[in-house]
Amino acid sequence: MREVTVRDVLREALREEMQRDKSVFLLGEDIGRYWGGAFGVTKGLAQEFGDERVRDTPISESAIIGVGVGAAITGMRPVAEIMFGDLSALAMDQIANQAAKIRYMFGGQAKAPLVIRAPFGAGVNIASHHSQSLEAWFMHTSGLQVAVPSTSYDAKGLLKTAIRGSNPVFFIEHKLLYPIKGMIPDEDYTIPFGVADIKREGSDVTIIATLYMVHKALAAAEKLSKEGINAEVVDPRTLTPLDRQAIVKSVKKTGRIVIVTEDCKTAGVSAEIAAVVAEEALDYLDAPIKRVAEPDTPIPFSPPLEKFVIPDEKSIIKAVKEIVH
Amino acid sequence: MIEKTKLLEMYQRMLEIRLFEEKVFELYGQNLVPGTIHLYAGEEAVAVGVCTNLRKDDYITSTHRGHGHCIAKGADMSRVMAEILGRKTGYCKGKGGSMHIADFSIGMLGATAVVGAGIPIAAGAGLSIKLRDTEQVVGCFFGDGASNQGTFHEGINMAAVWRLPVVFVCENNLYAMGTRQSMVMAIENVSDRAVAYGIPGITVDGNDVLAAYEASRQAVNRARKGEGPTLIECKTYRQKGHSRFDPAAYRPKGEVEEWLKRDPIHRFKTKLVEMGALTEEEDQKLKNEAAEAVEKAVKFALESPFPEPEEALEDVYAEQEHVNAT
């Protein structure tokens, strides 16, 4: 076992898959020799694999994804980077109408093993165009798979599964996770999609959390345990497919649920998970479903404003205490 | 000089497309075609001129007006017709319909109904060819309207800077739906835009199959030799309205008649007769054969079952393969 940051582990996964399969290549803005990506995920890969397989592109998000689709349906395994998740809006037709539907529309003839990586999330004061959490857009798009890793271990295993798979995957990276370290095994491993992970076992309340919120939920659970409340933290790890069973199973055990996500509350990821619980485990609930999410605003710039709209330990603890007495 | 057999094959393909489209129009009137249709009648010279230069393993991307592209690339008319009629035996098992036909086995990478969206996808197929080093070529069909989309700029720029083996074929039929080109472009020739990307651009008479053939022959050769993309603009005309619902009242009086005089099939026939490559008798024979082939396609399609409703749930995702650790 080794301790590695999420940033480094993503690079390891890309490197190992590029070594393993020559149809894997990377494209994106400034991912090459000089920058290695705005967050340094691809740093050094252009030097190692050459400019043909680690391609700097023009600032043309539609073409980055469209080129990825065209390459994917003709035998390649492109991994496209969108510099900031917010900018996926520029490529939305290629993502939602082309990549996601190309298999279905053509009656199963096409396979589009395209991975789109992009950093999302707030916390570094870069305001409304570089800080959103838009997982729900992609979760709402049939034909896409959506991965939401929260740890080094999950990031590596899920990225490998995404690259080796046969479907378009939106691979969400939370920018605050990049420097966070975690243990990973030395040997090659993958993590299947649709399998949630219990990050902390507990019996009094289930906290479902994704991405960076998993870490906030774990910190909140630590504090709650000192007050005698034993929280279980469940990380779905992929939103499509969603491990409904794991969510329902945990709720049946604890009878209470708090859902913590960084995206907007209305029609967000938390809404879908709440609906799953309402449909499949209502009779097991001893208290109303609680959601801790962004209060339906764009992400503001100034530190006190940004801090206010992003869920934190305090808001998680407060939500738990409202339903655990 | 093109061999006689090849010329006659081209002529026959054009006849097939025309008769196919006339039949689709007729079936639509009989309420046998769900949804809408966008007919290629009048533009046959472009698809046939371009696709005659392509190998079976070369790719094309297509548009909402795509029946002609499919047939020109060598698709089975029966399965095209079955798809248009929403049948289980159609190329896309009834999931795509008239605007979304693909046949990956002949490199027909599918028709997208989002105007301009196929342009970056064609560039991506070109990049794949370059990385796999296979000397294939991509023919990318789109209309004059698509050349005003951002994807036109982004896709062609990327193909140009990476010298990708793509032939961009703009079928300029003068109208984007009902909007005349002069209302939305300050230039007369879409091919002028090639200058902005540092690639060759050429405008040809899109109703002259030999002109479309020659321009694309040079562009395909260039692409295959790794010399990069070309933008070919083929000036042509949509003989019907935009879709089945469009009576096309926006066209000035006399314009249709003018263009009908330049009908690509009639012109090619006249030329073939002049060249001594075709007699009236042979012409009639080819027309009968094309009509028979279309009838066969219609029969196949009409006798084919509709898909089972539950098939709507299939093909959203591919089965996961080799995701296990090695």
Image (tube, coloured by chain):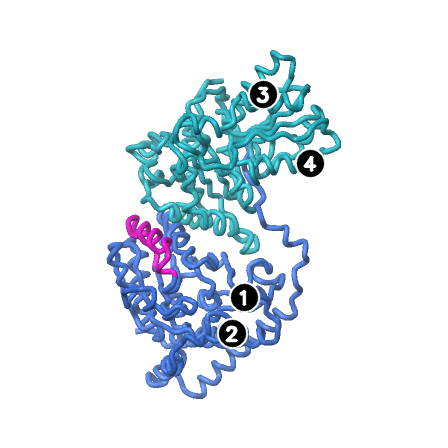
Do tag 2 and tag 1 residues touch (Cβ < 8 Å)? yes
The magenta segment is B146-167
Do tag 2 and tag 4 residues touch (Cβ < 8 Å)? no
Q: Residue at x 47, y 85 (%)?
A: B284
Residue annotated with mark 2: B20
Q: Residues within 10 Å of mark 1 (few under 14, many from 20)?
A: many
Residue B140: image location, x then y, percent: 39, 59
Residue B49: image location, x then y, percent: 37, 69
Q: Residues within 10 Å of mark 4 (few under 14, many from 20)?
A: some
Q: How many marks?
A: 4
From the viewer's perspective, is the residue at label 2 or at label 4 nearer? 4
Chain A shown in which color? cyan
Query: Hey, what amino acid is under mark 4?
Result: Ala
From the viewer's perspective, is the residue at label 3 or at label 2 nearer? 3
Query: Hey, what amino acid is under mark 3?
Result: Ile
As rendered, which of A83 and B310 lies closer to the eye? Answer: A83
The answer to whether B186 is drawn above or below residue A197 in the figure is below
N-terminal of the two: label 2 or label 1? Answer: 2
Q: Residue at x 55, y 44 (%)?
A: A140
Q: Residue at x 50, y 57 (%)?
A: B105
Chain letter of disc 1? B
Chain letter of disc 3? A
Residue annotated with mark 1: B80
